[in-house]
Amino acid sequence: MNSDFTIAVHCLVYLAYLPDHMACSGSIAVNVCTNAARIRKIMSCLRSQGFVKTKEGIGGGYILDCNPQEVSLADIYRTVSRGSLKPNWCTGDPAQKCVVSSNTQVVMNQIFNEAELYLEKYLENITLSSVLEKIKLCQ
């Protein structure tokens, strides 16, 4: 899995921490510790699914457009990372005569698909609001 999911959660929790506050990609990037271009890419996905709104120009940026008590981490995972548990390459070759080589890809794909379903089910029980509350307890 890449870090898009963690970045997306961080961005949304940050905006939830600053309710009714517009934050530009640069300030979000500083908070997340990545570059603004990466933030804009992820925020574009989040905007298309209605998690955030944007305003262009001076004083513009991103603002939360969802209820953090209702948005689960599964919602965010599905938006930015669904399918990312499965690696881009798997060992074996379906054309080989060896039963191990020819079937490893199919079996591993099934395992990763099931693992992703379990992960999504677990993430359903965690809201943006609960993540923010856990973060506040760290002080």
Image (spheres, rainbow, N blue to C red):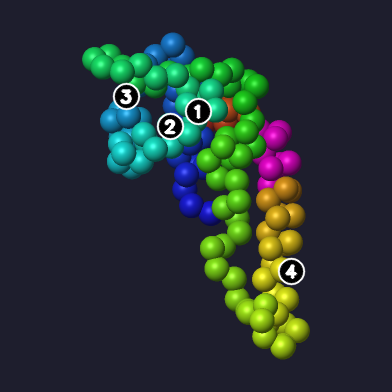
Label 4 amino acid?
Answer: Val
Q: Which residues are magenta?
A: 119-126
Occupied quadrant, residue 34: top left
Residue depth check, mark 4 versus mark 3: number of the one nearer the observer? 4
Pointer 2 with pointer 1, Cβ within 8 A? yes
Q: Which residue is mark 2?
A: 44
Q: How far across and down, in percent of the image, does residue 103 sit?
A: 73, 76
- In the picture, measured across the screen, residue 13 lies left or right of residue 124, that is left
Sequence-earlier tag: 4 or 3: 3
Q: Which residue is mark 4?
A: 107
Pointer 4 with pointer 1, Cβ within 8 A? no
Pointer 2 with pointer 3, Cβ within 8 A? no
- CA separation, marks 4 and 1? 34 Å
Q: Which residue is mark 1?
A: 48
Q: Is residue 120 magenta?
A: yes
- CA separation, marks 1 and 3? 17 Å
Label 1 amino acid?
Answer: Ser
Q: How far across and down, in percent of the image, does residue 54 sit?
A: 39, 19
Secondary structure found at label 3: loop
In the foreground, 101 or 114: 101
Residue 1 in sight in this render: yes
The 10 Å Cα crowd at callout 2, few under 14, some 14 to 19, many 20 or more, is: some
Sequence-earlier tag: 1 or 3: 3
